[in-house]
Amino acid sequence: MPEDFIGIEAFYKSLDEGILLGVRCRNGHVMIPTKPTCIRCNSRELKPIKLTGKGKLLTFTEIFTPAREYEKYAPYFLGLIELDEGCRLMGRIVAPRDSILRGINLKVGSEPSQKEGWPTWPKIVFTP
Amino acid sequence: MKTGRTKPLACIISAGSSKYGKRDGLYARELFAEAAYEAFDRCPNLDPQKDIDSVYVGQAYESLEHQANISPGFAASIGLQKKPTVRVESVSSSSATALRHAIFGILGGMYDTIMIGGAEKMTHRSVGEAIEIISMAADFPFEQWQGATLPGLCALIAREHMRLYGTTEEQMAKVAVKNHRNAVDNPKAQFRKEITIEEVMSSRIVADPLKLYDCSAITDGASCVIICKPEIARRYTDNFVEIIGTGEGSDAEIIMERESLTSFFSTKKASEGAYSTAKVEPKDLDFAEVHDAFTINEIIAYEDLGFCKKGEGGAMVDQGAFERDGKLPVNTSGGLKGKGHPVGASGAAQVYEAYLQLTDQAGKRQIQSPQIGLTHAMGGAGVNVVSHIFRRH
């Protein structure tokens, strides 16, 4: 992997420090570094870029039956947002219930993981 | 016959299924034996030890029973110890994928006769544990870790389908009502009790807008089929079924990377493959077993499989098009909803139903002289799909 490779671990380490990192491929496609290959053109030349962390809510749900890890939050809202750069991200929405509607503006933040051991990734939180 | 006689890829000479439900004290290998013994007993001319060349097993979650390398134990449980055996995993489509690859084994000339099955033991786990394990079908770093569950992902999809096409919660509820009604006549089904739209609508919310009765249950069960190359099917039975089409497709495994949230490329690609190998069109089908782990999945399947136009799935439910006496009966077995969803077994269970319907062995839920049927098995929230088309011999 190249020196400046941004993968899952680097993405989350950076998010823990308050920076939302994406990657841009040689053809200009911007994505969250979920994998080391561009999801649109299969380019493997991906360079890190700092994303604004601002987006709009595309779709959401309120989860009442979570996995054990999320029992402490339940019920909670899970949302899929489209960032200004065009790529998407999933996370928990923390906002007044009545304000949660498709199209609202949300910004990406994070909460440190409280779990022992691997993984140490933070939890993504969307707020107004 | 509605179509020209395409040459079969392989033939199903027998099939079996365990009773589905909460099977206290029985583990996957034992349920698998219950299914296999039914298949052996249906086909007395088959000598399993001598005739079966290999065992392909679908099983989704090794965490459930803390067991990796599960297939040799399955084979040994049915007297096929030391046969070549493999576990195939693509969550809810595991045993359908196993069937597809077993067909390749036959078409490649390596094997003459193969046992394909699937089994899952689930109800010994608490609901929290089960949800967590089932949700392993979602991407870990970007979905599970961020609070997504499998019902949660399907809820995101359902909300978008409702917005774009006007699909309603009542229409989704009607899918559950239909499938439970069909399950009443399936002695192997987990739930043999009719439910009402009101019961679905007032059941507790799992992931809004999906309620408890929109979701398939946690189930113990196993199903299997035995296939062979077409030239030798008659050696075993005259009452066999021809497999004439197979197809497979995938979509982005993380739903935020999908081009469409409300149409699955995986289903489109899989059905394209199945229809084209079988030289069959949707209008030629007499029944279908489709993936309905969540009611919205069945509505989207109608659209992606070409049973109706995009966005019309909900309206077709209102018209009763997919009832047992409708234009195209869907999920006569009760589907994953009514029959139960032991994840790794569900692909084989759909094929078991197709076998029963096409050999007139479906009892009270038998539809009249069906000629051609389709199965549609889906792993994850639209991630991987395998589809097969079957013909009465």
Image (spheres, coloured by chain):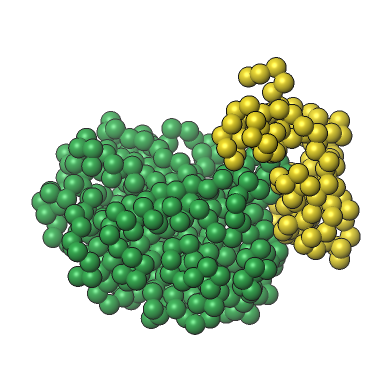
Chain colours: A yellow, B green
**Res. B296 visible in picture:** yes
Camera-side residue of B270 and B101: B270
Q: Is residue B166 above or below residue A125?
A: below
Q: Residue at x 81, y 30 (%)?
A: A14
Q: Position of residue B69 (x, y in %)?
A: 43, 32
Q: Is residue B284 above or below residue B36?
A: below
Q: Quadrant of the N terminus of chain A?
A: top right
Q: Please tell me which residue lies in front, B188 or B101.
A: B101
Residue B220, percent across and down? 48, 53
Q: Give the tally of numbered discs.
A: 0
Residue B170 shown left or right of residue A111 in the figure: left
**Residue projecting furthest to the left:** B235
Q: At x 41% / y 40%, what residue is drawn?
A: B88
- B192 left or right, relative to B241: right
- Residue A65 screen position, x and y as percent: 70, 56
Left or right, B221 with reference to B369:
right
The residue at the point 87 percent across, 56 percent down is A95
In front: B17, or A36? A36
Residue closer to the observer: B384 or B279: B279
The structure residue drawn at horizontal position 75% and vertical position 51%, both measured from the top left corner, is A81
Identify the residue at the far top of this view.
A3
Relative to residue B265, is residue A23 drawn left or right? Answer: right
Q: Residue farthest to the front?
A: A27
- Residue A39 appears in which quarter of the rendering? top right
Asked whether residue A73 is in view, the answer is: no
Q: Position of residue B269 (x, y in %)?
A: 43, 52
Above-or-below relation of A91 to B390: above
Residue B262, compared with residue B252, is above or below; it is below
